[in-house]
Amino acid sequence: MGGAWVDVNNDGLLDLLVVNYLQWDGNKEPVCLDNGHKEYCHPKFYGKTPNQLFLNNGDGTFTDVSASSGLRAHPGKGMGVGVADYSLEGRMDFFIANDKLFNSLFHNQGGGKFEEVAFDANVALRENGTYISGMGVDFRDLDNDGYPDICLAALDNETFPIYRNTGKGDFVEVTTQSKMGQLSAAMSGYSPMIADFDNDGWKDIFVSRGHVQSLLASSHLLVAQNNTVFRNLGGMQFAALTAEAGFAELAPSRHRGSAMGDLDGDGRLDIVVSALSAPAEIWMNRTAGSNHWLELKLEGTKSNRDAIGARIKIVTKSGPQYNHVSTAVGYASSSAGPVHFGLGHNTSVDLVEIRWPSGLIQELKDVPGDQILRVKEPPQ
């Protein structure tokens, strides 16, 4: 349920990953009841479907390589996808959150081949070994160590799991240690987004919230909910801000997709959220304080023009930060815009290092903050 643009072979052409949910036949739809009324059925009533990968031929056409790449051999019930080079090998990998099924992690082997390694990498299940209702996902570095981490949303009593990248090819779940387990246990979420919303140099986690069940289940479930941002306190510790962030100013709703970007050019990331049977919400970031920021708008030449897959490292007096170019964020959503960094009290960046998908490494030094820096991939 969703997809992403990604250059799987670093040839400068964007390929298309399509994440599929489940097999559904309207003629064989089961009747599922909740307190006497019809409700959405549990995913166990439906079969798995394979995900698809379409390789860009460079002439306006695509070739379906789902089988030859290895994706078709591992069907699922995908709800969200995160794209990142988690092993820092120069190739983009895919994490897919599945609904009441093992999650999938496709490790890019090169040559158009992927290996499914979710169990080996310790991201197939939650730490207690149970299936969860995996919804949206984001795949970015949360602890500023250079390795992309994973956060996904799920339903009440399932928490919003966080998997920390060890840098050794696998992950360790830190949902409990980070306080996310306790903070999110009563919540239902759909679309997580990892970004620095207060520009303090640590990426936070926004989650659009709402239950999958219909409003008829409101007598015993919290169906409509307010959104929440989990502020990163450093050291993989989080604090949940709902009313404190202003999200309780509107009535709760059944929120679904989300996107982010600096809509008014003030250096603070704003948020757009969709909801079922309700208007979309635009949340303007009014975080107080004097923290600084830098955004990087990259343009590839040998690499794909949007520079999707480029890895960026910045270094300030406070230390390094890392991010990468990807539009794959959240649930059934995408966020296309410059790569955003909060600088805290630093007014400039000592070093910007860009690792382009082509393999070229570019360095910029002594870059002033509080600007959108446009960078074009130099000739090789």
Image: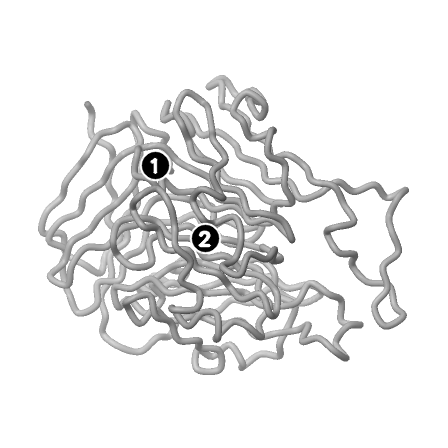
The residue depicted at 20 percent of the width and 25 percent of the height is 379
Disc 2 vs disc 1: which is toward the camera?
2
Is residue 254 placed above or below 332 in the rendered structure? below
Residue type, label 2? Asp
Q: Quadrant of residue 188?
A: bottom right
* Relative horizontal placement of residue 271, taking residue 293 as reference (left or right): right
The residue depicted at 13 percent of the width and 52 percent of the height is 367
Name the quarter where the C terminus is drawn. top left
What is the number of the mark on residue 194? none
**Whole-percent x and y of residue 179?**
41, 72
Q: Quadrant of residue 226?
A: bottom right
**Whole-percent x and y of residue 369?**
18, 59
Going from N to C along the chain, the mark reached first, 2 or 1, is: 2
**Whole-percent x and y of residue 261?**
41, 57
Is residue 245 placed above or below 284 in the rendered structure? below
Badge 2 is on which residue? 138
Q: Secondary structure at mark 2?
A: strand
The residue depicted at 22 percent of the width and 60 percent of the height is 370
Residue type, label 1? Ala
Camera-nearest residue between 2 and 177: 177
What is the number of the mark on residue 307? 1
**Whole-percent x and y of residue 140?**
37, 52
* Relative horizontal placement of residue 100, taking residue 167 as reference (left or right): right
Is residue 309 placed above or below 142 in the rendered structure? above
Name the quarter where the N terminus is drawn. top right
* Relative horizontal placement of residue 192, taking residue 232 as reference (left or right): right
| Mark 2 neighbour density, 10 Å: few (under 14) some (14–19) many (20 or more) | many
Q: Quadrant of residue 18?
A: top right
